[in-house]
Structures are given as structure tokens and as C-alpha cells.
Image (tube, rainbow, N blue to C red):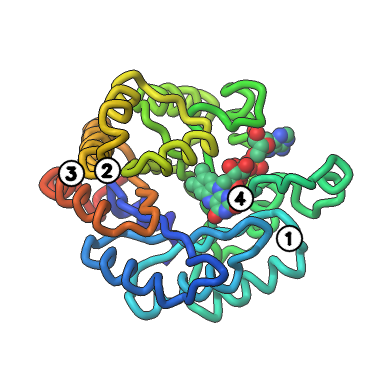
Amino acid sequence: MQIKNIYKKKKPIISFEIFPPKKESPIDTIYDTIESLKDLKPDFISVTYGAGGSTRDKTIEIASLIKNKYYIETLAHLTCISLTEEKLQKFIEELKENNIQNIMALRGDLPQNFNEELFQKSQYKYASDLIKSIKKDDEICIGGACYPEGHFECSSLEKDIENLKIKVDSGADFLITQLFFDNESFYRFIDLSYKKGINVPISAGIMPVTNKKQIERMISLSGASLPAKFSRIMAKYENNPQALKEAGIVYATEQIVDLLSWGIDGIHLYTMNRPETVRRIIQNISNIREALEYKDNIN
Ligand code: FAD
């Protein structure tokens, strides 16, 4: 099923993101993760795409497993880096052979050796270029990324939202946000986006932080700002892994409860392939999820 149709039928959508195991690890290591996530009844599970296409085959293989073995809808990520029209068509063909109709179309982070010349030579410079190309095929539904605090390369949030409008006008059917820890920044972003005429469903990307190393890495990668409350909790428990994990789960739960009460289209949990953490969060919101979920009655 095309994910845009799930958004039409149901609110809120609960989705998860997983990543393929590293090159040297066997693919089987992901099976247990999916098996555990399955019981939590996600509306879809997305599978990331490694830098420069390093996980291409695994991305398709895992997405196929999610769809055809577990019967859960899936979203295969794809990035512009080193992509050509021919490779794109092959990717789409393989997805169709595996009964997959959804692509998360991304530019990808530019590799360190990427200079202006290489950038200009790229067939797809921005995610919107890739989206335009995929859009020619109406069997494929397209997701795009968005950034509540602005993308780190862009001069301002307003400019980034102008670029986001191009992405949506190019054919993105729904959006998923970068992780954030401050819901107020998300609400501000939504307000600005609506004013710009962006009216596709948006899922909020939430990452439960459960260990110190992960926090440092994620914050430097995402550039997400840290509310004082978050920093206080992390500083207090950084040397107590169990307490930190507990606090991270509670923090993410509180964020989600607030977003659900606000009336969000969907929550996308960055699982970090840790189903136990996700399970605890989903259990925490199970009654709220049930109370809010409505189906087939959205105008
Ligand atoms: P774009 O939308 O192309 O934006 C990139 C920059 O260019 C922004 O600063 C934007 O403002 C600017 N811009 C956009 N369009 C234009 C235009 N027409 N003219 C001028 N400037 C423009 N990375 C991976 O490698 N694999 C993954 O699987 C993956 N999954 C992700 C999932 C989510 C939900 C998110 C939020 C990010 C993900 N990323 C992934 C990271 C992503 O690839 C990076 O954040 C990347 O730097 C930007 O990708 P984008 O698709 O948002 O790019």
C-alpha cells in the first residue's frame, strides 16, 4: 500500500526506522529486531540507505522481508549521492518486484571529498530533483525529509522551508522530520510550513536517547538544540547507564504524549535497532494511542 493512503485512513500513524547491519555483519542480525518490532503494530517500518549506496542491496532485502514475511508496510530510503537515472530505474524495478511501493527520497550527506565540481556533475543535486524523477511513476509513493530547526547547510529556517516547499511541489507525498528534543521548535516549524502552503502529512521523528555515546553522536550529526531540561537529565545520569536509559525513555514518552495531544499526523521512532526501548515507549502510550486512533473517517 502507498503510505500516503495510510495517512488518509488513520491518525496518528506510528512508524519505526531501522538500519541495515554493517557490511561485515550478517543480515540475520536484523531479523530479531523486526520480529520484536512486529508485535508493536507499526503502520510502517522504514529502512535506511547507507552513505553512497553502501547498503543498497541490504536496504531492499530488509524492506522486502518486512513487507513479504511480516506483512508490514515498508519505506525504502534512497539517496542522490552517486545515483544515476539508470540506477534509479533499477532500484524502482527491484522494489516493484518485491511488492514495495514507497521510497524515502533523500539527498544524503555530502561525502567529505565532495567538491563543487562533483556536486555540479551529480545527476540529482537535491532531494527535490530525485523526487521529480520518481514522481513520473505513479505507482510509487514518496516521502521526504524535513528539519524543524532548519537543515544545517541552509542559511535560515525560513529559507530551508522555501526549499521544502519545492520538495513538496516536486511530488513528496509526506514528510518525516529530523530528530528534535524541543517540541516548541516543531510547532514553530509546522506553523511556518503551513503558512508557506506545505500541506502534506508530517510525522515527527523522535529518538529516545539511551546512552551517552549515542547522545553525543546524534547531536553532532543532527544539530538538534538541547532544551535545559534535557541537558539537566543527561548530565545528571550520564555515568549511570541504567538511569540514563530510563530517563531517555521517559523523556521521549513525554515528548510523544505532548505531540499526540497536539494532534500530530504521525510519530516516527528512530529505533536504533533497539526494540526493547521502543517497546517500552509504545507500552507507555498504548492507551493514548488507542484513544486517539481513528480510521476511515478522515475527510
Ligand atoms: P535536500 O532536501 O536536498 O536539502 C539539502 C540542503 O539543500 C538543505 O540545506 C536545503 O535547504 C537545500 N536545498 C534543497 N533544495 C534546494 C534547491 N532547490 N536549491 C537550493 N538549495 C536547496 N541520510 C542517508 O544517507 N541515508 C538515509 O537513509 C537517511 N535517512 C534520513 C531520514 C530522515 C527522516 C531524515 C530527516 C534524514 C535522513 N538522512 C539520511 C539524512 C539526509 O540525507 C541529510 O540530512 C542530508 O544532508 C539532506 O538530505 P535532504 O533529503 O533533506 O536534502
Question: In 3D space, how far apart are the residues under numbered discs 3 and 1 (Cα atoms)?
Answer: 41 Å
First in sequence, mark 2 or 1: give its number.
Answer: 1
Q: Disc number at residue 83?
A: 1
Q: Quadrant of the C terminus?
A: top left
Q: Amino acid at mark 1?
A: Leu
**Residue where numbered disc 2 is placed:** 241
The quarter of the rendering in which ligand 1 is drawn is top right
Q: Amino acid at mark 3?
A: Leu
**Residue where numbered disc 4 is placed:** 106
Vertical placement of residue 242 versus 130, above or below: above
Question: In 3D space, how far apart are the residues under numbered discs 2 and 1 (Cα atoms)?
Answer: 41 Å
Question: In 3D space, how far apart are the residues under numbered discs 3 and 2 (Cα atoms)?
Answer: 33 Å
Residue 284 or residue 192, whichever sits in front: 284
Q: Report if residue 260 is visible in the image.
A: no
Residue 221 or residue 45, whichever sits in front: 221
Query: Could you classify mark 4 by the number of other residues whose Cα lies within 10 Å: few (under 14), some (14-19), or many (20 or more)?
Result: many
First in sequence, mark 1 or 4: give its number.
Answer: 1
First in sequence, mark 3 or 1: give its number.
Answer: 1
Kindly report which numbered mark, 3 or 4, lies closer to the viewer in this rendering. Answer: 4
Q: Amino acid at mark 4?
A: Leu
Label 4 C-beta lies within 8 Å of the nearest ligand 1 atom: yes
Query: Could you classify mark 3 by the number of other residues whose Cα lies within 10 Å: few (under 14), some (14-19), or many (20 or more)?
Result: some
Residue drawn where x is 53% and y is 34% of the image: 220
First in sequence, mark 3 or 4: give its number.
Answer: 4
Please report contact status of discs 2 and 1: CB closer than 8 Å, yes or no.
Answer: no
Q: In this image, 288 relative to 75: left or right?
A: left
